Structure formats: structure tokens, C-alpha cells
């Protein structure tokens, strides 16, 4: 199953090899107080997916099952346009303003009506 998600597997292996005190950027808080960073040790102790999954295969299976049940995030197209550019906003248009270009109803499963 790990072969279906090679990027996650590579990053997971790299993270497990880092020292417990190593600082890493935090992910979305999921109902908790937002944090901008965490440590490898904190993630290994508190991240429910890392605690529950004892092997890489279990971790990938757990995340894939979870992701299949979740709706597409409302701001996925917005965030992709910035993330794919390494955090940089799009170049300014002719009027000097920067725009995120969003195709309306282009992706099935988006939560447009909520």
C-alpha cells in the first residue's frame, strides 16, 4: 500500500529519522489552538495518526481511508494557486492587482453550497 503514496512515505520516513527536538511546521489545527510549529517529538506523542499507526503501511492506509471520507476543502483552489508557487502570490495583472482565478463548479465534491 505504501507504493500508492510514495511522497507521503518518503516524508514520513524522513520525519521519523529526525531528532525529537527538531522543529517542523505545524499542519492545520483540526479544532485545536493554532500553532505555527511543532517538534518531531510532539508529533510522535500527540498526532493521532502517528500514535495509532505503528507501521508506514498502517499510516498510509489510515490517512487514505480518512481522506476518502472528507469533503474537498472549500479553499483548495485558492491555496493550491499559492502553494504551487512556493507561497508566492500570482504575478500582478495589467492593473497592478494580484488575483486568484477560481473556476466556479469545476471540481466535483466541492462544498459550494454550504
Image (cartoon, rainbow, N blue to C red):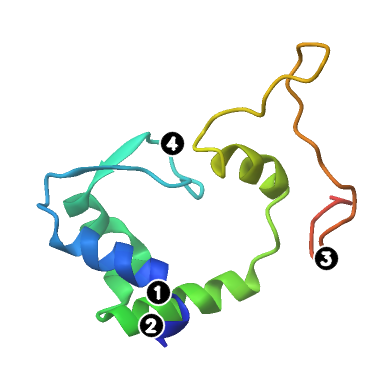
Q: Nearer the viewer, mark 2 or mark 4?
A: 2
Q: Earlier in the sequence, mark 3 or mark 4?
A: 4
Q: Are marks 3 and 1 in contact (CB under 8 Å)?
A: no
Separation of marks 3 and 2 at Cα, in angstroms: 27 Å
Question: In the rendered image, which residue does mark 1 sit on?
Answer: 6
Residue pictured at 15% horizontal, 44% vertical: 22
Q: Secondary structure at mark 3?
A: loop
User: Which image quadrant: the N terminus?
Assistant: bottom left
Question: In the rendered image, which residue does mark 4 sit on?
Answer: 34
Report whether 27 appears left or right of 44.
right
Question: In the rendered image, which residue does mark 3 sit on?
Answer: 108
Q: Nearer the viewer, residue 52 or 80?
A: 80
Q: Where does residue 8 sit, x and y in percent of width and height?
A: 39, 67
Question: In the rendered image, which residue does mark 2 sit on?
Answer: 2
Residue pictured at 20% horizontal, 52% vertical: 40
Q: Are marks 3 and 2 in contact (CB under 8 Å)?
A: no
**79 is higher (above) or lower (below) than 67:** above
Using the rendered view, name the quadrant where residue 67 is placed.
bottom right
Q: Are marks 3 and 4 in contact (CB under 8 Å)?
A: no
Using the rendered view, name the quadrant where residue 24 is placed.
top left
Separation of marks 3 and 1 at Cα, in angstroms: 25 Å
**Mark 2 crowd level (few <14, some 14–19, many ≥20, 10 Å Cα):** some
Q: Secondary structure at mark 1?
A: helix
Separation of marks 2 and 4 at Cα, in angstroms: 30 Å
Q: Earlier in the sequence, mark 1 or mark 4?
A: 1
Q: Where does residue 90 sit, x and y in percent of width and height?
A: 66, 29
**94 is higher (above) or lower (below) than 24:** above
Residue pictured at 63% horizontal, 42% vertical: 79
Using the rendered view, name the quadrant where residue 61 is placed.
bottom left
Amino acid at each position: 500500500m505504501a507504493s500508492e503514496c510514495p511522497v507521503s512515505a518518503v516524508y514520513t520516513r524522513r520525519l521519523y529519522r529526525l531528532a525529537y527536538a527538531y522543529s517542523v511546521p505545524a499542519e492545520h489545527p483540526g479544532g485545536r489552538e493554532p500553532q505555527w510549529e511543532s517538534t518531531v517529538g510532539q508529533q510522535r506523542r500527540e498526532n493521532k495518526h502517528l500514535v495509532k499507526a505503528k507501521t508506514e503501511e498502517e499510516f498510509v492506509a489510515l490517512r487514505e481511508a480518512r481522506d476518502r471520507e472528507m469533503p474537498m476543502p472549500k479553499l483548495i483552489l485558492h491555496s493550491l494557486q499559492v502553494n504551487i508557487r512556493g507561497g508566492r502570490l500570482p504575478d500582478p495583472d495589467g492593473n497592478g492587482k494580484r488575483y486568484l482565478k477560481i473556476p466556479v463548479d469545476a471540481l466535483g465534491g466541492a462544498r459550494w453550497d454550504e
